[in-house]
Amino acid sequence: MKQKKFIASLAIASLVLAVVGYYPGVNSAQAVNSLTAAKALLSESAPGTAATTTISFTSGTSTDATGYFEVVMPAGFGDVLVGNVTCSTGAASAFNTETIRCTGVQAAGVKTITLANTTNPTATTSQVINIAHYDVAGNLAERVQVVVQIIDNVWMTARVDATLTFTVAGMNKDATVNGAVCTATTSATSTPFGTLIPTIPSTVCQELKVTTNSSAGFVVTVEQDTEMTSDGNDNINSFKDAADGAGLGVAEAWVSPSTVLDNDWTYGHMGLTSDDTTVVGMDYNGTKYAGLIGSSVMNVMTHDGPADGSTQDKGRVAVAYTAEINALQQAGDYENTLTYIATPTY
């Protein structure tokens, strides 16, 4: 009979340990209440990384001036510095590098203790944090254990392929581009001025569309292989009255060639404008024209992000080329080649 009683006593003791849990330095015979609603939240759970640990719980009793709440961090965590401890009530102090206290008069209720910039253990393990409440006499009044899990971060990846579609389309006669009226119908590959009549400007137009998912946007430039040149090697110079191979890099209002005898660069010129109101490096607004400089590129369309191929200034613009001659321009058939280049930045 005595043996049965002894076995029953062991069973009861094991049950108490399972419910209350072991806490260092506490007499197992002492009656201790539990702190409730306890939890610990790590701002970063990866091994070996600095994190902020926010501990919260509810106390059922008040605290005297010298009473305190104590948090004991596992040895695997880095040192807890008192300057990194914030107590919702009471003053923070460090008992040692693993134990911190919040001391002072505190009413019962919800408490929060924050430990900033504490390094997580280097192993992926669960870690037990002990929290205790001591009264003015140093007696343990309440306690609880919480567990945090140190675990590797999950590396999430995705890929989005780069896209770019650039198209050039013709425009109909009588359409307008930035205030200029198109005087001839064009195609994607042909911009025929037709027969130029002295003192009467002739304008041809094209539409440019860009669709891209480039993060930093794109630039569309245009360049010419040469100025418009005839079989007799005469040329229609670039706007405005520019010498051979020169042009106008800052857009200005259209003016007629100045007509100075023996200065053949004043006999006729060709310039361009764009209805892109935000084009980088060039202000075409107000029907302003620039003159292509030799075979150098000139911006006619820009945007600083993805483009849909249809929104004005962001995916679609129109450009116009105007040519005007006077009676001194040499007779002949003139031609050159324009090249558009769309350059996205990803």
Image (cartoon, rainbow, N blue to C red):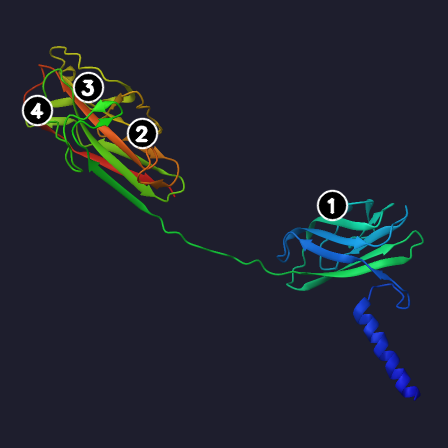
Can residue 296 be seen by looking at this rendering?
no
Quadrant for the N terminus, please: bottom right
Position in image of residue 141 (x %, y %): 88, 57
Contact check, label 2 and label 4, Cβ < 8 Å: no
Residue 127 in the image: above or below residue 117: below
Distance from Cα at disc 4 to Cα at disc 3: 23 Å
Q: Where does label 1 land, which residue? A: 84
Q: Taking 32 as reference, is 216 left or right? A: left
Earlier-in-chain disc, 2 versus 1: 1
Q: Please, is residue 194 above or below residue 80 in the view?
A: above
> With 308 as the anchor, is 204 left or right in this view?
left
Earlier residue among tags 2 and 3: 3
State how far apart marks 1 and 4 are (Cα). Answer: 83 Å
- What is the count of numbered marks? 4
Tell me which amino acid carries mark 4: Thr
Q: Residue at x 78, y 50 (%)?
A: 110
Q: Residue at x 91, y 57 (%)?
A: 139
Q: Amino acid at mark 1?
A: Asn
How far apart in space, not on screen, are marks 2 and 3 (Cα)? 28 Å
- In the picture of the structure, the residue carrying the numbered disc 4 is 195
Q: Where on the picture, by quarter, is residue 274?
A: top left
Expressed as whole percent of the image width and height from the top left, the position of residue 228 reads: 14, 27
Asked whether disc 1 touches disc 4, contact meaning CB atoms under 8 Å apart, the reply is no
Label ID, residue 243: 3
Q: Nearer the viewer, mark 2 or mark 1?
A: 2
Mark 1 or mark 4: name the one nearer the start of the chain. Answer: 1
Quick one: label 3 or label 1, which is nearer the N terminus?
1
Q: Nearer the viewer, mark 4 or mark 3?
A: 4
Q: Are marks 2 and 1 in contact (CB under 8 Å)?
A: no
Q: Which mark is residue 276?
A: 2
Say left or right for 222 vs 191: right
Residue 317 seen anywhere in this rendered image of the structure = yes
